[in-house]
Amino acid sequence: MALIPVLVAALLAGALVYSALTVFAAHHYLGTRPSRSLAGPAVSILKPLAGAEAGLERNLRSFFEQDYHDFELLFAVREASDAAAGVVEELRREYPKIHARLIVTGEPPYANAKVYSLDRMMAEASHDLLVMSDSDIRVTPDMLQVVAAEFEDAHLGLATCPYRAVPGPSRGRSGGSFWSVLEALGMNTEFLGGILVARIVEGMKFAVGPTIVARRAALASIGGLDRVKDYLAEDFVLGKFVAESGWRVSLSSYVIEHHIGSQGFRANARHRLRWVRSTRRSRPAGYVGQVFTNPIPLALLLVASDASWWPVLIATALVRALAAWAVAGWVLHDSLTARRWYLLPVQDLLSFAFWVAGFFGNTVQWRGRTYDLLADGRFKLKH
């Protein structure tokens, strides 16, 4: 037997084992049933904003409508003229009983502008339990009830919320643009699957995603948010540092909605390249291991090298479908994957291509600027 088919077959075998582990990890996560508390600790919600993106008003409104006894909302914009500031002021007038404040930060001295906004809001926050949430997140009224109940565990320092990605509309259709649909399918199957597997294999020693809940004391134990100001993947290293300081880090039982917008191919490609390159720099060994998260491309490579392996391609597609549905269906209750499942092989091939591309290049584009990625995951503005 030729060497290449044997090598690819070995990688595919590993990918199939990984898919089976994904199914087990999803089932294990479902054993964590959310509890609710209306009388938990007071909460400060921190929202960094930049521009009035599509759906911003509905996203922010969902936080104003929390069914919880004591919480405040803090918003940060770079300039008072930011369009997002107007949205916040309208909501403040509509919900006068909700304690909400808007902070104008000015130009950020940190490489990571989001971290600077969070740091400014944290300094103004009144409470010790902090919900740090991006502008494109939408939640149900019981969100604070669920996460506050989880923090009844005194050893829990930080929780990261899994998310169901929702693509933005395109040309008046509710189904989402093609590229945003593919990205959402990847987030709702492959990406979350990796988190669930890591939770089983090594425990939560990191944080991910656009909503993180943390104790002020846990953040203080790592030197505050200033510790992560130079990292592009600040969420990942934040959880890593908190875990290393002795606090427990968890994957919350509450699933948020992440509205990812409707990007064209070029913008989507820049976003994906930023994602894969920053992941490679943040955890290089784990990045190499991502080869096992895409069994269908490996099966296609195997058939291309030796056509007699074609039955394996069919079996691989079935295993991948089961793993994808365990994550998107069982955990996320994702209607997008249920409707557009036939695009999963396309997304898997695209994901594999960007994974390969992620091994090359050490620059990323973010908010119109180009940055150099350093070997330890930090980044700086390219001159």
Image: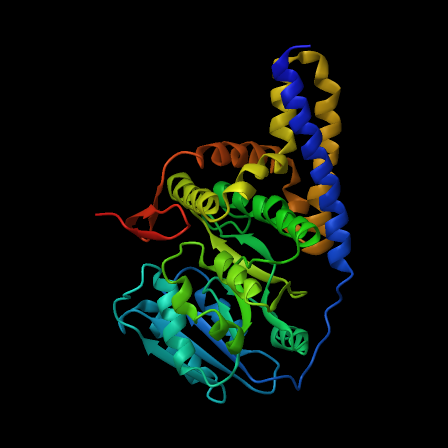
Question: Which of the 4 quarters of the picture holds residue 118?
Answer: bottom left
**Residue shown at 63%/42% (left/top)?**
340
In the shown orientation, is residue 180 left or right of residue 102? right
Residue 283 location, x and y as percent?
A: 50, 47
In the shown orientation, is residue 5 left or right of residue 209? right
**Residue shown at 66%/86% (left/top)?**
39
In the shown orientation, is residue 83 left or right of residue 29? left
Determine whether 90 is above or below 18 in the image.
below
Answer whether residue 248 is visible to the viewer in this image. Answer: yes
Determine whether 42 is above or below 326 in the image.
below
Determine whether 5 is above or below 61 in the image.
above
**Residue shown at 61%/33% (left/top)?**
345
Residue 142 location, x and y as percent?
A: 64, 75
Residue 367 location, x and y as percent?
A: 32, 53
State the colouring used for the structure image.
Answer: rainbow
Question: Which of the 4 quarters of the picture holds residue 258?
Answer: bottom right
In the shown orientation, is residue 139 left or right of residue 370? right
Answer whether residue 51 is visible to the viewer in this image. Answer: no
* 325 or 96: nearer the viewer: 325
Which residue is most to the bottom?
97
Question: Which of the 4 quarters of the picture holds residue 108?
Answer: bottom left
Which residue is most to the left?
383
**Residue shown at 40%/76% (left/top)?**
121
* 238 or 365: nearer the viewer: 238
